[in-house]
Amino acid sequence: MPELPEVETVRLALDKIVKNALVKKVEIYRYDLRWKVKDNLKVNLEKDILKKPFRMGKYILIPTIKNKILLIHLGMSGQIKIQKKNHLKSKHDHIDIVVQAENKLTYSITYNDPRRFGFVDFFNKKDIYHHFLLKNLGIEALSKELTVNKLKPLINNRKKSIKNTLIDQRVIAGIGNIYASEILYRAKIHPKRSANSLSNQEVDTIIKACRFILKKAIKVGGTTIKNHAQPDGKLGYFSQKLKVYGRAGQKCFYCKNNIINMLITKRSTFYCDHCQI
């Protein structure tokens, strides 16, 4: 599943294309994504002008000159393809947006999603903090707002594991299953520790590990886990440098004990039972 670094990689690629771009044509091949695509998306988006995209958690948002927001959610297997000129439709392409960029070149921005767990929406900018996917998002994982003073009160009464707390988008927006394991491994915190058992110093260590891991992943372009591909067609390669995720039975980089894979609420969680306490 694309996580924050993958989504940010897509946003950065879109940023080079969509800012001040005119939407010339919208083609909707399937409406039945995770939620039904609005019938009026094509009519309302065509002839609008896109502005600089930004991200909230795992969602890409592209404002328009008409005070609308185009929201893209990649879901489990979604990806964005960017092609010059007209797009040649391929399997699992569901929405195609043809734009004339600021440099006058024409690009096709295509939403492709084999499992159709993602979503594309278009709504009024004034409703952004009331949108059903955005209204309950927690602290942005890479924002300056993620501090011990802000995070500690949110977890003081949580008996759930710190692993489940990290992937709860209502607490921290953007962290998923892969990077939660990586963050806790770097912080040397056992994933089953209850969130309310952590000291201020341990919370600070997790926050620092979070910034380090996510920024590093963004820098190298995201992982190749599952179906994610960068918009230019090149796969990311951070998965080759994952320290713990997917390495069950292999040696820990710190102590040389074997990495363990256990299920926490039915999700694979990788850790070292010697280094992580």
Image (spheres, rainbow, N blue to C red):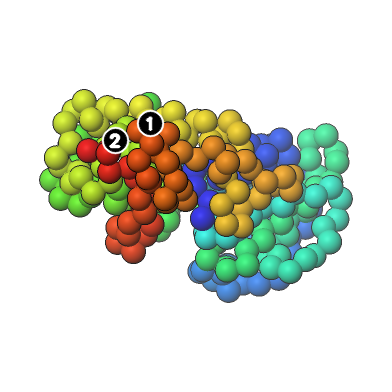
Instruction: Residue 240: give x, y in percent of width and height.
Output: 58, 41
Query: For numbered disc 2, what is the local secondary structure?
Result: loop
Instruction: Report if residue 81 is visible in the image.
Output: yes
What residue lies at 73% left-to-right and 69% top-to-bottom?
Answer: 91
Q: Are marks 2 and 1 in contact (CB under 8 Å)?
A: yes
Instruction: Residue 261: give x, y in percent of width and height.
Output: 36, 54
Q: Is residue 107 above or below residue 74?
A: above
The quadrant where residue 78 appears: bottom right
Asked whether, in this view, residue 191 is left or right of residue 21, the answer is left
Give the residue number, with chain letter if any, for mark 1: 254
* Alpha carbon separation for disc pair 2 and 1: 8 Å
Give the residue number, with chain letter if any, for mark 2: 275
- Which kind of residue does numbered mark 1 sit on? Tyr
For disc 2, the neighbor class at 10 Å (few under 14, some 14 to 19, many from 20) is some
Q: How many marks?
A: 2
Asked whether, in this view, residue 157 is left or right of residue 270, the answer is left
- Which kind of residue does numbered mark 2 sit on? Cys
Position of the C terminus, as image quadrant, is: top left
Instruction: Residue 52: give x, y in percent of width and height.
Output: 62, 36
